[in-house]
Amino acid sequence: MHTRNPVACPSVALTIRNDTSEPMVLRDSALPEGRWVLPPPSSLQPGEAATVAASTGDDLGIGIRLTYSLPGGARAIFLAQTYRYGDSSVDGTRIEPDEGYVVHTQIDRRFPHMCAHYSVSLLAPT
């Protein structure tokens, strides 16, 4: 019997921080090729951070999409993908519509165990 080495299974860990003055509420999550290890919280209060993690038995990689609503009808869309034959990326992470909020991203580790950080904050007035 062959058992898969869990260390060799690709994974993604995201830390999401709400640096706004209002709660963020989970509206949607997508994990097409894996399973949640730490599922996304239903909401993030102001100043709160949460870690979301997923893994897959597919040694080619994994991708995640989370959508949180913000006051005023805006949505924070968080994307993370890490694949063997490509780069790890947070491309597509954004605020829609782009009114009053900004999301900052940082990738600390890449394939096979990606770690990324996201921070949503209010746009500074110009």
Image (tube, rainbow, N blue to C red):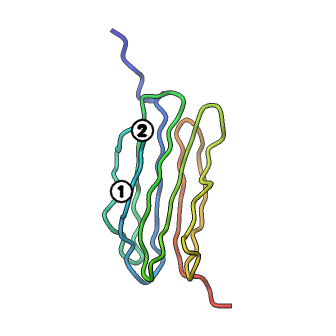
Which amino acid, mark 1?
A: Pro
Secondary structure state at the residue bearing disc 2: strand
Q: How many marks?
A: 2
Q: Residue at x 47, y 80 (%)?
A: 20
Of the pair 68 and 10, the residue shown nearer to us: 68
Q: Quadrant of residue 46?
A: bottom left
Which quadrant is the C terminus positioned in? Answer: bottom right
| Residue 92 picture location, percent across and down | 60, 57
Q: Is residue 124 left or right of residue 47?
A: right
Height in image: 85 above or below 48?
above
Q: Residue at x 55, y 74 (%)?
A: 97
Secondary structure state at the residue bearing disc 1: loop
Q: Is residue 65 left or right of residue 35?
A: right
| Residue 90 picture location, percent across and down | 59, 53
Which quadrant is the N terminus positioned in? Answer: top left
Height in image: 71 above or below 2?
below
| Residue 107 picture location, percent across and down | 60, 53
Residue tagged 2? 55
| Residue 87 picture location, percent across and down | 66, 41
Residue tagged 1? 40
Which amino acid, mark 2?
A: Ser
Considering every residue shown, the one lying at the far bottom of the view is 126
